[in-house]
Image: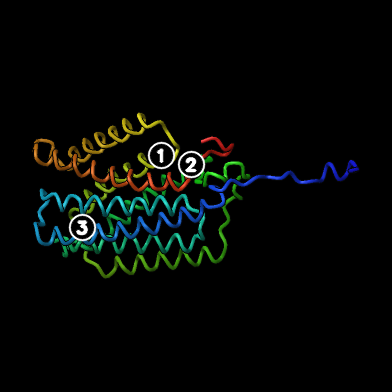
Amino acid sequence: MTTLAETTTAAPTVRVEPRARNAAIIAWTLAVLFVTAAAELNIVTLTWVRVGGREWPQPGWILMIALSFAQTGLVALACGLGRQHLALRAWMFVCTAAITGFYLSRGGEESRMGTLMVMLFFYGILVLTGTWLLQLRGWRLVLAHEQQQTRQPPWQFSVANLFATTTCAALLLGILRYVQIEQEELLLDMVVSGILAVIPLGVGYLMLTRQRPALVILGIFGVVLATTFAFVNFTGDYQDYQSAVFAFFLMLFTSLLVFGALVIVRLAGYHLVRGNGKG
């Protein structure tokens, strides 16, 4: 026979589904497989560009640009929405932007390596800013079995985080100090980076909030058209039909690469929910 105190203090038994227990393992396995496939695709594309042609109209060169921005955008999304230590996320972001800028310059624009790094840093920071705005509005990235958990603790900025941030800033400034940057086209490059930053933010929101498939397809198509129009308008190539076509394919490839990666993220069980647990 139980007493009143025992009845009120007994903790309820929560049944954990097998998928919930294995969600983290599934997520890490898919992440490793995705990174491996992405690395192989980068190598194949770089070989294609260096052998087949390095000019802008070449399909391989467009795919290489799309790969670089899509991967940097995905890492920026992971760093902005992730819950790892701030130092780890900061180092991952800085290293990804630097390595991707170096990779992109190997396609035939070695002299623009510094400019490409600056573009990717700026692009990634814009994506990070978008994820922080989402978090300020109460959105967070969770696994499927974490929907009933309480809210995350408020942001804390420790001495270790301050040291990690200043170290990354020093590393970034050191990289930019010893690379050549084209001042004449820097403003236009920043505009292009800002336009491309819309893609991972828009596609990421559509995919991770678990919208209906029809809405996702229409939304991605709208993002592609909007970014293509902005790109050709700001670069002054709107009278060149060929440039507009290749700009469209650049936005399309980038969107599809981000979409494909986020399909894997959704299969792993991750999605965005608001503070009350409703995505």
Name the amino acid type tagged 3.
Gln
Label 2 secondary element: strand
**Total numbered labels placed on residues in the image:** 3
Name the amino acid type tagged 1.
Tyr
Mark 2 or mark 1: whose residue is earlier in sequence = 1
Q: Which corner quadrant of the image does residue 14 belong to?
A: top right
Of the two numbered discs 3 and 2 in the rendering, the one whose residue sits closer to the viewer: 2
Name the amino acid type tagged 2.
Leu
Asked if the residues shown at circle 2 and circle 1 are in contact, with their CB atoms under 8 angstroms apart, the answer is: yes
Crowding at dot 3, Cα within 10 Å, few <14 / some 14-19 / many 20+, comes out as few
Q: CA distance from mark 2 to mark 1?
A: 8 Å
Crowding at dot 2, Cα within 10 Å, few <14 / some 14-19 / many 20+, comes out as many
Q: Residue at x 34, y 50 (%)?
A: 73
Q: Which corner quadrant of the image does residue 7 belong to?
A: top right
Residue at which label 1 appears: 205
Of the two numbered discs 3 and 1 in the rendering, the one whose residue sits closer to the viewer: 1
In the displayed structure, 67 sits above or below 90; it is: above
Residue 165 versus residue 81: which sits nearer the camera? 81
Residue at which label 2 appears: 272
Mark 3 or mark 1: whose residue is earlier in sequence = 3
Q: Indicate the position of residue 86 as horizontal and vertical percent values.
A: 49, 60
Q: CA distance from mark 3 to mark 2?
A: 39 Å
Residue 8 versus residue 63: which sits nearer the camera? 8
Check residue 92 in the rendering and tell me which mark sits there, or answer none: none
Check residue 183 in the rendering and tell me which mark sits there, or answer none: 3
Residue 208 versus residue 222: which sits nearer the camera? 208
Mark 3 or mark 2: whose residue is earlier in sequence = 3
In the displayed structure, 216 sits above or below 27; it is: above
Horizontal side of 252 relative to 13 (left or right) equals: left
